[in-house]
């Protein structure tokens, strides 16, 4: 994941024209990371490509929550409970180790979608698992962009297991769902968590997926970054970024886990967009034939996820 | 609380120079409300004065959470557990009724502080309680403003119970705390929740507190609204508004309760500021003697709450 961080950062620097700034930090409770951030770049208004590797003890209460959540995930997928669950979280702090790479890019041009990717490996007591994924959040729907993104992930998944893409695409639609808005965060991608089993095989899939990020996203940026946009599109982007914040602070496991384990706040919240507006809009934007038709077109997809491959 | 809503709205309209827009809504599960909102006003960049009265059933899981949280609050205050707790949340949905007034005002001028006030009455199964309070979030510290705000609330509290102010001031400092930042949201005020006992007496206090809101806030707005400010102060305000969002979406009980009980999203999230920036700032602003000295002066108070009366 450190190698992948290097590759992603240098490609993005060429794309943007400006360098990322790097901060190396250590966590008082154990571990640390390398945060690489760009603010007010040429293409990216804000973004980060962060590696971290942290370890320490979870409180019994939080440890129980982590386990309960893992078991809910397993049960929802029809998997059997793990034997280590009953023993863990019984009044003793539980050790954890978590490493991963997180990428979030908020472009300035509203025609270029925001992207998020995360690839993590976690040990908790005697259990371990892989998690991760990547999802695309457009402000204006371009079907060819959504198809390209999904096709790239399907190709990466298919190299390892022909069932992965369908399963992880659905999981992504379910995970990046803003329940109180009744909307998906974007057009999805893939998401997986609590993947256990054959370590070597999963490790190969996980690293390969991390390596597919640039292919999934960079061609979209290149296609859209020079397109002209209207002030209305910019305003819409700022409002939609508000939904991004709502998801990350209310629902996102990674964010909550990071803040609860005394992670480095500025690295965790690097995911939040640079400039955001919240208005008062009890009604959605105009119908598909009006000037703001691209808004209702996007909302239709967010309210009813599609198959892209 | 409807009367208080009317009084607050008309006074704020005179102060701002522009009218609030009113939306009357009903909740599918039971009840409804009157949302009054101002966007891009003369003084208030965004704000709301919202009345709601909702009722229905809580799921057993959420009902247990509400009860557990109430018991944690009671235990933290050294109060005995309630007998109705064991019986509730045992697999049956529990009825609830909640009514209240919420005020949040985000001024455009960074020298005018943001204010929040809430006065609520809740019935949950056979239990009932009053909650509420008001707190001030300045972007630049003016001690006389903080003293005025706190003095007004102390006077309102003292009319009912000489112990209220000290207790509710401390509670406010504890409640409006952004744990992951190690900062209070602002300079506090009063906060109380799960207040039970003599209904008539509590009702008189609660209504009287609601009636004190204008005295606590309006003189501060009048004093500051015409002051000139620098672009730096505006940028700092946008960044600090980010903290406001972090508190409301991660920690605020009212927001989470509202979203979980399928409240009206646009009314609940009216509390979010109009325009917000998230940068990448691992280090706080310059020292007290530098140009941004007002920033570190504010941070010092947020990190170590003071007595203002």
Image (cartoon, coloured by chain):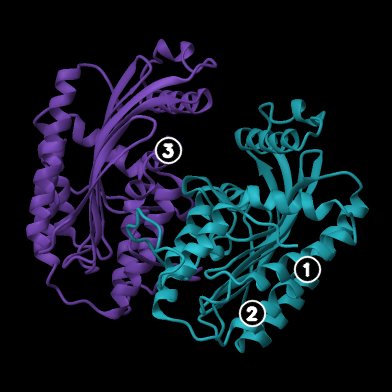
Chain colours: A purple, B cyan
Q: Which mark is residue B152?
A: 1
The answer to whether residue A284 of the structure is visible from this angle is no
Q: Nearer the viewer, residue A92 or B117?
A: A92
Whether discs 2 and 1 lie on one chain: the answer is yes
Q: Residues within 10 Å of mark 2 (few under 14, many from 20)?
A: many
Q: Nearer the viewer, residue B24 or A36?
A: A36
Q: Nearer the viewer, residue A161 or A265?
A: A265
Do marks 3 and 2 both belong to one polypeptide chain?
Answer: no
Residue B121: x and y, percent? 77, 53
Q: Residue at position x 67%, y 35% from top?
A: B93
Image quadrant in which the N terminus of chain A is located: top left
On residue B221, which mark appears?
2
Say if B72 sits above or below A19 in the image. Answer: above
Residue under circle 3?
A: A262
Give the mark, 2 or 1, whose residue is nearer the N terminus. 1
Q: Secondary structure at mark 1?
A: helix
How far apart are labels 2 and 1 at the CA level? 15 Å
Q: Is residue B163 above or below residue B220?
A: above
Chain containing mark 1 = B
Left or right? Give the position of A82 relative to B40: left
* Residue neighbourhood size for the residue with mark 3, other residues' Cα within 10 Å, grouped as few (<14), some (14–19), many (≥20): some
Query: Marks 1 and 3, Cα distance to the nearest angstrom?
Result: 37 Å
Q: Residue at x 38, y 17 (%)?
A: A125
């Amino acid at each position: 994941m450190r190698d992948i961080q290097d590759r992603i950062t240098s490609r993005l620097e060429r794309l943007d024209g400006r360098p990322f700034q790097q901060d190396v930090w250590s966590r008082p409770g154990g571990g640390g990371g390398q945060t690489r951030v760009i603010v007010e770049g040429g293409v990216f208004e804000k973004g980060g490509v962060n590696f971290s590797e942290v370890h320490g003890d979870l409180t019994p209460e939080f440890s129980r929550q982590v386990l309960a959540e893992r078991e809910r995930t397993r049960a929802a997928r029809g998997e059997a409970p793990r034997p280590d669950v009953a023993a863990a979280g019984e009044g003793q702090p539980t050790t954890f180790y978590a490493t991963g790479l997180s990428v979030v890019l908020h472009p300035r041009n509203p025609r270029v979608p925001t992207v998020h990717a995360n690839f993590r490996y976690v040990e908790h007591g005697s259990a371990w698992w892989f998690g991760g994924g990547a999802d695309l959040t457009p402000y204006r729907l371009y079907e060819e962009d959504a198809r390209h993104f999904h096709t790239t992930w399907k190709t990466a998944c298919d190299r390892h297991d022909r069932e992965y893409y369908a399963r992880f695409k659905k999981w992504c639609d379910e995970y990046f769902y803003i329940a109180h808005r009744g909307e998906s965060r974007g057009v999805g991608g893939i998401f997986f968590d609590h993947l256990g089993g054959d370590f070597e095989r999963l490790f190969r899939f996980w690293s390969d997926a991390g390596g597919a990020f640039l292919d999934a996203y960079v061609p979209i940026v290149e296609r859209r970054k020079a397109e002209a946009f209207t002030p209305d599109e910019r305003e819409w982007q700022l409002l939609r970024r508000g939904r991004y914040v709502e998801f990350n602070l209310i629902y996102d496991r990674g964010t909550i886990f990071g803040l609860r384990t005394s992670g480095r706040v500025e690295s965790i919240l690097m995911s939040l967009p640079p400039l955001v507006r919240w208005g008062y809009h009890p009604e959605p934007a105009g119908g598909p034939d009006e000037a703001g038709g691209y808004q209702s077109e996007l909302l239709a997809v967010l309210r009813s996820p599609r198959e892209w491959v």
